[in-house]
Image (cartoon, rainbow, N blue to C red):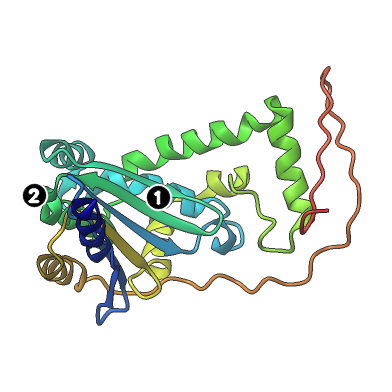
Amino acid sequence: MQQEEQQTEHHSQDTQPVLWSLANGLQVVCLPLKYVEYVAADIILPGGVINDPEGKAGSSLLLAELLSRGVGTMSSQELLTAFDDHGIRHGESGSSLSLSLRSSFLPQETKRALELMSMMLREPSFPEEAVDPVKALFLHDLRSVRENPSRWAMLELSNRYFPAPFNKSPLGEEEDILSLTQSALKEQWFGRFGPKGAVLSVAGRVDVDELKGAIEQYFSPWKGECEEIPELTEFPKRRSVYLNYPGAQQQLLFRYPSPP
């Protein structure tokens, strides 16, 4: 029993979060966990689809997907190989409210993982030849919505329930995505996403002092700031809507601001 109590106390001491920030505004949260055998690192940047400029709805989704298509002088394949050679699992995604990068790796690969993540943020290349294939991915998703009545109904409900810009489709808009160019996407990335307002979280078997040094080395050259999430305004008047759908099924959806 005494041994279990000592182990619990030891784990409790290990799991105290450590918070700090860099001079460029990046907020860092670290949770040392000495009893696990891996590390996870996530970066979240405010400014998703709801912050996409007029006529460019969906651009943040494309930006997230394009981050892994090349950085600096490294091609998409070279970047993928760099991650794979060190056993680093990673993923990038955009949503209505934010853009995020995720990774997990063994403790000895912490510095390399942070270096690669910082390169994706500081010097993404957004290669011209990757833009159209990425656009095609999201256009396919958009065009398939009508084939899924429950998904279509939910998107239409959100569009009518929330005030602008929170009612924007999380999939973007077809015409806007079609119009996006490499130069427009680059301009948005370097103008909308930076360290000020972003949060880097790291959890797992890490030495906090070594981690601070690595984060300072790789992320302090990153410049810029993220956009702020807009204020939530008054909700539209409640009403019922019927969507005509030529199918055998009926979808009935309700939404309440709180439990009825």
Q: Mark 2 points at which residue?
A: 108
Whole-number angstrom distance, CA of label 1 to CA of label 2: 27 Å
Q: Nearer the viewer, residue 92 or 214?
A: 214
Q: Quadrant of residue 55?
A: bottom right
Residue at 76% from the left image edge and 58% from the top image edge: 258
Compared with residue 64, is residue 129 higher up or lower down, i.e. above or below? Answer: above
Compared with residue 116, is residue 246 higher up or lower down, i.e. above or below? Answer: above
Residue at 21% from the left image edge and 55% from the top image edge: 2
Q: Return the x and y of residue 40 as percentages of the image width and height.
A: 26, 50
Q: Return the x and y of residue 17 as percentages of the image width and height.
A: 30, 68
Residue 197, numbered circle: none
Residue at 21% from the left image edge and 68% from the top image edge: 219
Q: Mark 1 points at which residue?
A: 64
* Secondary structure of the residue carrying numbered label 1: helix
Q: Which of 111 and 174 is in front in this view?
A: 111
Q: Decide if residue 166 is on the left or right side of residue 199.
A: right
* Secondary structure of the residue carrying numbered label 2: helix
Q: Return the x and y of residue 43 as percentages of the image width and height.
A: 34, 59
Compared with residue 252, is residue 42 higher up or lower down, i.e. above or below? Answer: below
Residue type at numbered disc 2: Gln
Q: Decide if residue 131 is on the left or right side of residue 73.
A: right
Residue type at numbered disc 1: Ala
